[in-house]
Image: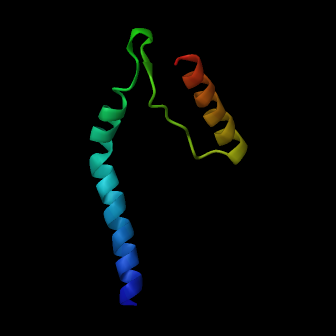
Amino acid sequence: MDEDWNHTSSLVDRVVSFDMQQTSLRTWLTSFGVEERQYNLLQEVNGNQSKDAVFDQISGVISSVLQNK
């Protein structure tokens, strides 16, 4: 039982840590891109869709990155 609690506790710690660092990480990642075109390499993908919709969205992001490199 203690081992299960350690795994759960570790997962909770990781989620909390991610939430705390998300803003600074997002700020840092937005500094990459093509400034003269105002193109940001940080793109968000909505994962709360069907796998085909997520795949299409990711394919679109990849195409956009390749066009703006």
| Colouring method of the image | rainbow
Q: State the residue lying farthest toward the right.
A: 52
What count of labels does the image hold?
0
1 vs 32: above or below: below
Image coordinates of residue 8 in percent, x first then y, are 39, 74
Residue positioned 59% across, 17% down in the render: 67
Residue at figure coordinates x 35%, y 66% from the top left? 12
- Name the image quarter holding residue 17: bottom left
Where in the figure is residue 39, as x and y percent of width and height? Answer: 45, 18
**Which residue is farthest bottom?**
1
Relative to residue 45, is residue 31 depicted above or below? above
Q: Would residue 48 be found to the left or right of residue 38 on screen?
A: right
Q: Where residue 15 appears, x then y in whole percent?
A: 36, 59
Residue at 63%, 34% (x, y): give it.
Answer: 57
Residue at point 67% right, 40% down? 55
Residue at the front extreme of this rendering: 69
Horizontally, residue 55 falls left or right of residue 45, namely right
Task: For the N terminus, give its image quadrant.
Answer: bottom left
Q: Residue furthest top?
A: 36
In the rendered image of this protein, does residue 37 appear above or below residue 54? above
Where residue 49 sits: x, y (%)?
A: 64, 44
Residue 32, by quadrant, is top left
Q: Quadrant of residue 10?
A: bottom left
